[in-house]
Amino acid sequence: MIGVSDLTLSRGERVLFRDLSFSLAAGEAVALTGANGAGKTSLLRALAGFIRPDAGTIAFADAEPAEARRRHIHWLGHLDGLKGARRAREELNFQAQWLGADAAGTAAAVDILALEPLLDLEVRQLSAGQRRRLAFARLVAAPRPVWLLDEPFAPLDARWRAALGLLMQAHVDKGGAILAAVHDPLPVAARTVDIGGGR
């Protein structure tokens, strides 16, 4: 689904990594590892189209990069990207509609992620784990084949790590692909791409 060839990325004056090549295939999970500061988040941001690499190519199967990013990729960053002053219901509906979800998809996300008791609360009243579940809901409500995830389980307790692990496994089993920056092992079978140590 994604091919990365000879990629070089910098942050400011510092080169994070050089000549990185790997691929992400349909039905595959890849754990992106490396020391703090090695460039895991920057790599995900480059794949999502937020930053431009210094050199190398990022190719998407069967689509131009802009089209692939617009229609085929979900990005879930380390920050949840939620508006604190909105009620959870409003934020979920906004996110889902922006991504093209229908009412059935949004309802499924609420059910799968047990969000119903949270929907009338403001986002800023939610715990970090609850906010992460709310952010994850858009991946369920508006299915897309590629998930780019930055430390997806960091604020979650053991119960929800296991539950979202099942969600990830179902996504892969249906032919989806996941690239996740992690420090701990993913709860699904995954190939590892290690980008090395920070300097």
Image: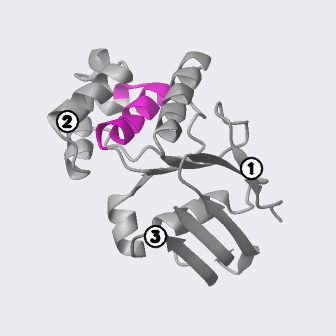
Real-space Cα separation, disc 1 to disc 2, in angstroms: 37 Å
The residue that disc 3 covers is 49
Crowd class of label 3 (few under 14; some 14 to 19; many from 20; radius 10 Å): some
Real-space Cα separation, disc 1 to disc 3, in angstroms: 22 Å
**Labels 1 and 3 touching (C-beta < 8 A):** no
> Mark 3 belongs to which amino acid?
Gly
> Mark 1 belongs to which amino acid?
Thr
Q: Which of marks 1 and 3 is nearer the N terminus?
A: 3
151 or 189: nearer the viewer: 189
Q: Which mark, by number, is residue 90?
A: 2
Crowd class of label 2 (few under 14; some 14 to 19; many from 20; radius 10 Å): some
Q: What stretch is highlighted in magenta?
A: 125-142
The residue that disc 1 covers is 192
Q: Does the magenta stretch include residue 129?
A: yes
Q: Identify the element where label 1 is drawn.
A: strand
Residue 186 at x, y percent in the picture: 67, 36
Q: Does the magenta stretch include residue 82?
A: no
Q: Identify the element where label 3 is drawn.
A: loop
Q: Earlier in the sequence, mark 3 or mark 2?
A: 3
Real-space Cα separation, disc 3 to disc 2, in angstroms: 27 Å
> Mark 2 belongs to which amino acid?
Glu
Image height of 89 relative to 83, above or below: above
Mark 1 or 2: the one toward you: 1
Q: Residue at x 55, y 46 (%)?
A: 27
Left or right, residue 125 beside residue 187:
left
Q: Identify the element where label 2 is drawn.
A: helix
40 or 32: nearer the viewer: 32
Q: Which mark, by number, is residue 17?
A: none
The answer to whether any part of residue 54 appears in the image is no
